[in-house]
Image (cartoon, rainbow, N blue to C red):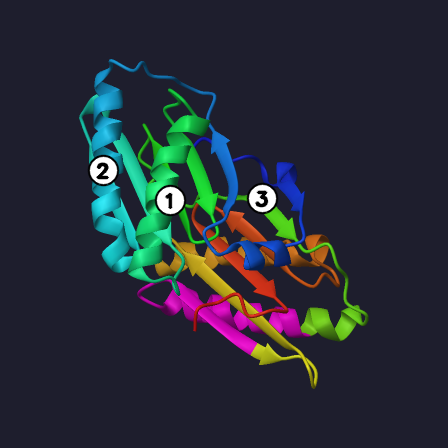
Amino acid sequence: MTTSPHPALLHLLSLALLLQCVLGGDSYLYQICSNSENYTSNSIYNTNLNKVMASLFRRVPPTGFGLVSVGQNHHRVYGLALCRGDVSSKDCKICIANAKTEIRKGCPNHKEAIIWYDYCLLKYSNYDFFGKIDSPKFIMVNSQNVSDPAPFNKKTKELLNKAAHEAYLSSKKYASGELVFSRSEKLYGLAQCTRDLSTAYCKECLNVALSYLPTCCDGIQGGRVVGGSCNIRYELYPFLNF
């Protein structure tokens, strides 16, 4: 998608992510609207976009992932939706329902847009982005630091490298895990790609996401690097639905 900014322009959202755990997993995270092209409400593109949204809503919850394209030539719309790998079909359906409504409100008449929730992402475009890497777009970090950064960073790297390796080899392109950090603490993490990516592209996408950790998340209690094709996350609290 042409909404992808250069990596140097990544948006840094410094948040206390623990709040999301309290509010629930279906929390809105971020949205990007493309400024390249617009459509009108009475256009063929709008009709095709409506069909894409409806189809994604039907197709995605049972498996957690879906690709849809509708239309011909410059009226064609490509859509993709992904739910987090540990999310139930019920929660996935709720998230996709919210996403398909809010993405149109937040990006009215834009031919390209992407929206992220804690449980899902949804994007559409007039360009064929299937099977292509949509680079990282934003970073979220916890507002709290750990007392001893060096061993914590080492454990975080170990956990996420393992998750990334398992994810790109998995048919679902998803992996999660936990790791004992101290007597009283555990680290929890995940790595995930959209399932249209090849193994090689998923690996590449996750490696790029992992490369931001030393800069964004040095000694930080929790963080995530999020894109349109992959994401990684770690926390000191159990945010996953094991």
Q: Circle 2: is it few (<14), some (14-19), or many (20+) Cα within 10 Å?
A: some
**Residue at the (26%, 22%) spot, across then down:** 46
**Residue 80 appears at what percent x and percent y?**
32, 43
Q: Circle 1: is it few (<14), some (14-19), or many (20+) Cα within 10 Å?
A: some
Q: Earlier in the sequence, mark 1 or mark 3?
A: 1
Observer able to see residue 195: no
**Residue at the (54%, 76%) spot, across then down:** 178
Secondary structure beneath label 2: helix
Region rendered in magenta:
155-178
Residue 145, relative to residue 54: is it above or below? below
Disc number lying in front (3 or 2): 2
| Screen quadrant of the C terminus | bottom left
The amino acid beneath tag 1 is Lys
Closer to us: 18 or 154: 18
Q: CA distance from mark 3 to mark 2?
A: 27 Å
Q: Is 76 covered by the magenta stretch?
A: no
**Residue at the (62%, 40%) spot, across then down:** 10
Secondary structure beneath label 1: loop
What residue did someone put label 2 on?
54
What residue did someone put label 1 on?
132
Residue 222, relative to residue 188: is it above or below? above
What residue did someone put label 3 on?
138
